[in-house]
Amino acid sequence: MTPSPPTHQTSLLTAQHCAGQIHLILGANPLAASRASSSLSAGAKPILISATPSSSCSDLHYSLAALITSQQLTHLARPFDSDDLFTLGRPEVGGVVDAVFVTSPASAGDVEKLSALCKRHRIPVNVVDAPALCSFSLLSVHVDGPLQIGVTTNGRGCKLAGRIRREVAAGLPAGLGQACERLGGVRRKVVEEDRKLGERAGKGDEAEDEGVDDSVEQAAGFE
């Protein structure tokens, strides 16, 4: 039977591995602080670009000031320049940054130009309150150790997504994150033992790949 087409266009949900990546954050408001914290949690290196002088922490959100003081967040106290996209990134990718977060309102023309420039060079860009200018969006996420559960309404309302996320999290059993950690450790040991047994039997590396996607357990219809 031919599957029916989806009623709504959906997003391709992925878990990005961001360790060592360079993320630009434009703005110095509470949302910028949230983006910086999320970036750091993912192992990335956020760079804040804001005209607010770094010596005047009273003009920065307190979370940003704390991250700058602890040297977890680099602050460039100047206006954004388009060359920043191609000079502040990692050497191994030619200096191109890995993602851009625009967190504060700016003139529509400037933001549209920035979004177009990022998209032209395939730099992921997220612009606050402007879904049409974004190439990606962030989910409302529940985190419990290695367990992450994300919710999106695909632009229908971030507060609604947050409410749904809280409802889902409230229904989870206590200690589920720790259970994932323990089961993951057991699985790694089993895979390693299988690999060693395979080597002894001359079967090479036929043991199950530890890096397999979570999506392999889904049905063919991705339900």
Image: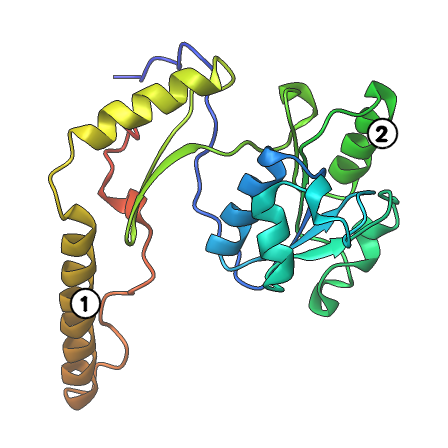
Task: Estimate how packed mark 1 is, as few (under 14), some (14 to 19) or many (20 or more) residues with alpha carbons within 10 Å.
Answer: few
Q: Residue at x 71, y 64 (%)?
A: 90
CB-based contact (under 8 Å), mark 1 and mark 2 = no
Vertically, is 32 above or below 17?
above
Q: Is residue 17 visible?
A: no
Q: Is residue 71 visible?
A: yes
Where is the C terminus found, in terms of image quarters?
Answer: top left
Vertically, is 48 above or below 181?
above
* Marks 1/2: CA–CA distance: 47 Å
- Residue that carries the numbered disc 1 in the rendered image: 185
78 horizontally vs 12: left or right:
right
Say what secondary structure mark 2 lies in. helix
- Residue that carries the numbered disc 2 in the rendered image: 113
Residue at the outermost bottom position? 200
Residue 63 on image: x %, y %: 56, 46
Q: Residue at x 80, y 27 (%)?
A: 111
Q: Nearer the viewer, residue 101 or 74?
A: 74
